[in-house]
Image: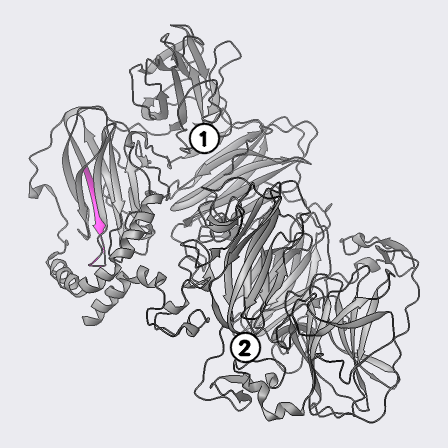
């Protein structure tokens, strides 16, 4: 029991512990040293990072969601850094979304726009940090965007390190402007004692756009911890830490106290730090030169990590634009075959992809390459170790190659020859490799095998441009049987990718030959210093078409991971295309990876982090990649055998997946069956991804010979905190236009949607389905997409978000207009629409002001003809009328050509809010819906309509709902947090207890409304289910059934019933905690002198734990009083538990926790105030409206396909 008390105490104080700093009072030199010295790791909070991100779950990172993590603006001008988000930033300050959450609710640090000096610098400084290990990495996501400007000035973003003795730059941002978050990885090297990081932005006042940083992460920065015993093949530091023997006496302080470099054995190494001269090394006489220098690219050496330290820098002493090479020669070394002779060196390669570093041996006039590094590898000094096996005396040749027109990007430092390298007498005569034969091609051209030239941009573009096809011979498609691999390893750490022959390790056979004589690309141990993943890159490829696919076989045993990224070298962006993690067995696995459309040249990057595992790749092929490749699959698809003519758009964030509802990955919100067969396949996207991420399906260019086509599809949107499904069209060479959209949960059923396309004459088009996630719980699915000739049937639902859905007001003098509140300069109207509850949402409006529509005059809006409704159907809609003399809203059903009957009329003054109404309709002939607005002859009057919906069941009484056919007039209140009640049948999709059956039918096929309180992130968060407006009453009975079964005895989830009126809100009933395992009934007498709404509000309470609250069979009988309210009014299930134990235990626990709770009061109050700032304001409850009318059996839109979208971001 005492352990239980302690657990609850710690959980109660968890928020306090998250932000506390150095609770255990460790010495200052141990604070912010990347090691947890306190039991709660509080010494690593507010260090420019927190011990752990509550959002990401990552250690030693700052995502700026809670606070600034200790970063301080130290600017000396009006140009400053601020913690910001799109909700409060001004244009020219920060991006629309952050990197962490990918939404406009996420936080970042932005350099705020200024109107001061011509040029100003904004500086952001970290707290004082301690003792960075040699392996330390700083990862920063940054966003630099100047609208319409691709090139930006130097110095826009820089990162500096300042210790007690010096300040030096470790990175300067790119000079290109990209509307995307990018990542930079910085390698600090070993830093002794205290230091600070400063991030600066220098800009002119006229430069506007977005400049921000987010997710600053420190990896592998702590010094090694003492161990009880070091392995026999490692060095024991004086601190008690252990260092691998290969890193002993290698010029890097791996121990943290430099004991691995002070050992007497280190004196036996032939070391050259270039602090005085070239030591025993010499330079070959040639055009390129190594220059001994300091303080210039890079700004520090490796030896002392100091700007005054010297190193060798590769540059050119000639204006010749041809490629040059700088060569460094060792003294002559005696022959060696025992592996005891090796070289450790440190190199810097950054800023250009044209740099190459080659390590060779020279003997008897022959030069053999034994090691190679190439490309732009990052901002830092990197380690390499090369073992020499030579049957005769030799020289080590280190050659730095610099591309045409490059003025250097390559540096060397700290060359360590091991004691096994014995210096020989005499010298060898070195001569540079003979120059290759002169090429007939000019700069920017490629030489084909037949001695003709083509543009370099045509090489590896998935089409033969050389007659002999040599331009497509080394383009990433390989079985690795050739010794000349076109994949280039870019690894800098302790792992690398290498083409190898099967050598007795796993896998014991390649895939190509299925023998031990074959070759594959294998993950191998490397000689680097850093703890980064291994990377290998293809040559430059493309551009590519929509169907482009990379096929390959991979092997992954005993854990680890393999990932495939698509790199845009121009923008510097990396896009994840595929990844796999965990043991995949002992067999080769086949995978088809979508590469998709890339309009620029790109590279494929393979990344693996499987140090103790076996990872390999073989038989890589690129298929259907040329941009003009079109496959013949149909757009119509039931997904039983694949995606048909639909393709994963590789410009998005994640992919649609194909499933049959019984996959390995289980989700309670995913459909349990498809729409086609009930046992077949569908496509889905899971909300368990970062907010703001999109998944897009896209077709090839489609041509049409008919004037109209009907796109039909079935969709499933289920989950309380989900996102948006969007349908778009893009004409060849044009922009994307919005056709159809739905947001939020639509219940646990498949819904039918379709849209009439009217293709533009002679223009091909593409269709796009896009799932946008702004929530974090639920799934979106698609099935049975059909494209056929002719128009779709008239729509039964219209939100007016994209168009008028076929409603026609004619071209006369008086018409209904489609508008949103931003456009309402000509017509006053609602402050927001009903569908989206925003100023950007659309509705239809009739201006009934006397200056526009004379008194008594009418304006009509007609629907398209509907088929007969022999069975009763329900017409649902929302209307909004000006508060002063709006006139009349009349609704008619016109059956046949002449018969017209009125089914609804309202003309009274109402509150400034959207009102719900429903009408039961039954017709025997084809019919139309007519909406009529009648002017009252007053000023500033209007009538608006939104969310018209025809459902195939009889309308319930106002305020009543059994949830069998939907949620009736009940809908979710709109809140900033986006928490919503949902609608389902059977078992609740929650890990917590809930109803197994509904109350109406008493079985698993019956439906009810529910809310999972585990979704609420704080005590103050809430979710409301709101009724339609009900008329004033002197006494009416409101009855309902509720279900509250919580497994945790201390959970205090709460259900509250409130009355909302124009005067405010009144709580009329509430209950909390566990109540019963069955359904309970409640009757309440409702009285209100004015129009009102009833709201059921679910809250979480302060106690840890969560559960499900459910409602069913809501019944409101106007004018009927309930029986006397007594204790016996509740009809409970006999299985109801006693709460006596809960009460007694709660009292005991309260006493045990009192002292600890007092310690957290201050924080809790502060947290409460913060949460209130983002919670829904209820000061004007009459304006709060329902949002998700989520029970729609048929969604249809009939909009002209070329209808332009506005600039709204969905």
Image location of residue 160, percent across then percent down: 58, 62
The answer to whether residue 772 is left or right of residue 1096 is right
Observer-nearest of 1036 and 426 = 426
According to the picture, the residue beneath numbered tag 2 turns out to be 612
**Picture residue at 45% right of the left edge, 85% below the top:** 227
According to the picture, the residue beneath numbered tag 1 turns out to be 841
Q: Is residue 601 visible?
A: yes
> Between disc 2 and disc 1, whose residue precedes?
2
Task: Let me know if residue 473 is in the magenta part.
Answer: no
Based on the displayed image, in which of its 4 quarters is residue 493 positioned? bottom right
Give the magenta part as a residue range.
1040-1050
Image location of residue 679, percent across then percent down: 45, 50
Q: Can residue 582 be seen in this view?
A: no
Vertical position of residue 593 compared to residue 1087: above or below: below
- Residue 1033 is marked as none
Vertical position of residue 1199 compared to residue 526: above or below: above
The answer to whether residue 169 is left or right of residue 827 is right
Vertical position of residue 1140 compared to residue 33: above or below: above
Image location of residue 605, percent across then percent down: 65, 62
**Picture residue at 63% right of the left edge, 89% below the top:** 266
User: Which circle, 2 or 1, is nearer the viewer?
Assistant: 1
């Amino acid at each position: 029991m005492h352990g239980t008390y302690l657990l609850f105490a710690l959980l109660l104080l968890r928020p306090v512990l998250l932000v506390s700093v150095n609770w255990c009072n460790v010495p200052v030199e141990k604070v912010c040293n990347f090691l947890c010295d306190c039991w709660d790791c509080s010494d690593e909070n507010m260090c420019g990072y927190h011990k752990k991100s509550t959002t990401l779950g990552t250690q030693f990172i700052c995502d700026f969601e809670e606070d600034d993590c200790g970063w301080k603006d130290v600017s000396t001008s009006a140009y400053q850094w601020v913690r910001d988000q799109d909700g409060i930033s001004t244009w020219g300050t920060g991006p629309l979304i952050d990197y962490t959450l990918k939404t406009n609710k996420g936080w970042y640090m932005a350099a705020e726009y200024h109107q001061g000096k011509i040029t100003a610098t904004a500086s952001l400084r970290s707290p004082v940090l301690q003792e960075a290990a040699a392996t330390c990495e700083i990862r920063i996501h940054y966003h630099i965007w100047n609208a319409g400007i691709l090139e930006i000035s130097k110095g826009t973003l820089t990162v500096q390190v300042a210790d007690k003795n010096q300040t030096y730059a470790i990175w300067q941002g790119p000079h290109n402007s990209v509307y995307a978050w990018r990542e930079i990885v910085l390698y600090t090297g070993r830093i002794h004692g205290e230091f600070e990081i400063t991030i600066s932005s220098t800009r002119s006042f006229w430069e506007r756009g977005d400049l921000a940083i987010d997710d600053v992460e420190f990896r592998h920065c702590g010094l090694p911890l003492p161990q009880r015993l070091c392995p026999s093949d490692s060095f024991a530091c004086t601190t008690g830490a252990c260092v691998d023997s290969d890193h002993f006496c290698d010029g890097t302080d791996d121990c943290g106290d430099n004991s691995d470099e002070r050992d007497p054995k280190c004196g036996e190494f032939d070391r050259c730090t270039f602090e005085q001269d070239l030591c025993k090394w010499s330079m070959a006489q040639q055009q390129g030169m190594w220059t001994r220098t300091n303080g210039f690219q890079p700004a520090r050496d490796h030896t002392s990590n100091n700007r005054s330290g010297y190193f060798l820098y590769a540059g050119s002493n000639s204006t010749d634009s041809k490629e040059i090479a700088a060569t460094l020669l060792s003294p002559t070394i005696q022959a060696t075959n025992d592996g005891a002779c090796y070289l450790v060196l440190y190199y810097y390669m950054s800023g250009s992809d044209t740099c190459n570093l080659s390590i060779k041996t020279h003997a008897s006039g022959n030069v053999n390459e034994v090691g190679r590094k190439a490309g732009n590898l990052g901002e830092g000094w990197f380690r390499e170790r090369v073992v020499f096996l030579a049957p005769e005396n030799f020289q080590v040749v280190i050659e730095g190659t610099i591309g045409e027109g490059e003025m250097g990007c390559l540096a060397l430092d700290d060359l360590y020859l091991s004691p096994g390298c014995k210096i020989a007498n005499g010298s060898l005569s070195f001569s540079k490799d003979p120059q290759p034969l002169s090429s007939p091609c000019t700069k920017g051209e490629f030489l084909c095998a037949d001695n003709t030239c083509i543009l370099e941009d045509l090489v590896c573009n998935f089409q033969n441009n050389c007659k002999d096809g040599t331009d497509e011979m080394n383009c990433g498609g390989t079985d690795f049987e050739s010794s000349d691999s076109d994949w280039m390893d870019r690894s800098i750490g302790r792992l690398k990718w290498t083409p190898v022959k099967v050598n007795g390790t796993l896998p014991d056979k390649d895939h190509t030959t299925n023998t031990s004589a074959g070759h594959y690309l294998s993950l191998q141990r490397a000689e680097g210093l850093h703890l980064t993943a291994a990377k290998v890159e293809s040559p430059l490829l493309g551009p590519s078409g929509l169907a482009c696919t990379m096929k390959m076989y991979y092997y992954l045993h005993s854990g680890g991971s393999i990932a495939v990224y698509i790199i845009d070298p121009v923008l510097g962006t990396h896009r994840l295309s595929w990844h796999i993690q965990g043991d995949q067995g002992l067999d080769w696995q086949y995978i088809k990876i979508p590469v998709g459309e890339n309009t620029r040249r790109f590279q494929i990057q393979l990344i693996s982090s499987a140090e103790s595992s076996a990872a390999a790749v073989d038989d890589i092929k690129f298929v259907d990649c040329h941009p003009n490749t079109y496959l013949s699959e149909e757009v119509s698809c039931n997904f039983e055998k694949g995606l048909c003519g639909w393709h994963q758009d590789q410009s998005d964030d994640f992919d649609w997946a194909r499933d049959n509802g019984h996959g390995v990955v289980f989700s309670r919100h995913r459909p349990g069956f498809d729409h086609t067969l009930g046992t077949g396949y569908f496509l889905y996207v899971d909300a368990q991804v970062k907010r703001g991420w999109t998944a897009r399906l896209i077709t090839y260019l489609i041509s049409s010979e008919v004037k109209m086509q009907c796109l039909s599809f079935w969709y499933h949107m289920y989950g309380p905190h989900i996102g948006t499904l969007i349908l778009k069209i893009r004409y060849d060479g044009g922009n994307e236009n919005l056709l159809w959209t739905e947001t939020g949960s639509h219940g646990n059923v498949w819904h039918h949607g379709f849209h009439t396309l009217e293709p533009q004459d002679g223009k091909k088009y593409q269709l796009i389905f896009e799932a946008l996630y702004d929530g974090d719980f639920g799934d979106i699915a698609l099935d049975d997409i059909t494209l056929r000739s002719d128009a779709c049937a008239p729509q039964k639902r219209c939100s007016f978000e994209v168009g008028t859905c076929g409603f026609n007001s004619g071209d006369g003098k008086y018409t209904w207009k489609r508008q949103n509140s931003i456009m309402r300069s000509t017509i006053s109207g609602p402050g927001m629409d009903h569908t989206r509850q925003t100023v950007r949402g659309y509705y239809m409006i009739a201006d009934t002001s006397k200056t526009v529509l004379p008194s008594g005059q009418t304006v009509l809006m007609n629907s398209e003809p509907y088929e007969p409704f022999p069975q009763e159907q329900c017409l649902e809609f929302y209307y909004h009328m000006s508060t002063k003399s709006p006139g009349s809203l009349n609704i008619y059903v016109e059956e046949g050509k002449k018969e017209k009957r009125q089914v609804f009329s309202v003309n009274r003054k109402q509150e400034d809010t959207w009102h719900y109404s429903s009408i039961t309709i039954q017709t025997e002939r084809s019919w139309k819906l007519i909406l009529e607005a009648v002017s009252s002859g007053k000023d500033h009057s209007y009538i608006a309509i939104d969310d018209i919906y025809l459902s195939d069941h009889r309308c319930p009484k106002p305020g009543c709902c059994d949830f069998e056919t939907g949620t009736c007039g009940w809908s979710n209140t709109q809140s900033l947090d986006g928490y919503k009640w949902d609608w389902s049948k059977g078992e609740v999709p929650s890990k917590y207890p809930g109803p197994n059956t509904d109350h109406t039918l008493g079985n698993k096929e019956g439906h009810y409304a529910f809310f999972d309180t585990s979704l609420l992130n704080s005590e103050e968060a809430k979710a409301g289910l709101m009724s339609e407006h009900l008329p004033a009453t002197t006494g009416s009975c409101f009855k309902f059934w509720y279900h509250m079964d919580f497994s945790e005895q201390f959970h205090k989830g709460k259900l509250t019933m409130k009355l909302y009126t124009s005067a405010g809100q009144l709580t009329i009933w509430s209950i909390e905690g566990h109540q019963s395992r069955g359904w309970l009934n409640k009757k309440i007498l409702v009285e209100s002198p004015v129009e009102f709404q009833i709201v059921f509000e679910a809250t979480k309470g302060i106690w840890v734990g969560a559960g499900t609250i459910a409602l069913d069979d809501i019944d409101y009988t106007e004018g009927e009083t309930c029986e006397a309210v007594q204790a016996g009014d509740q009809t409970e299930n006999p299985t109801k538990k006693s709460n006596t134990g809960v009460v007694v235990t709660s009292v005991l626990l309260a006493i045990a926790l009192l002292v600890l709770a007092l310690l957290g009061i201050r924080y809790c109050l502060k947290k409460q105030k913060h949460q209130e700032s983002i919670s829904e304001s209820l000061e004007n409850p009459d304006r709060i409206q329902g949002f998700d009318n989520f029970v729609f059996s048929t969604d249809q839109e009939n909009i002209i396909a070329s209808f332009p979208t506005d600039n709204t971001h969905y």
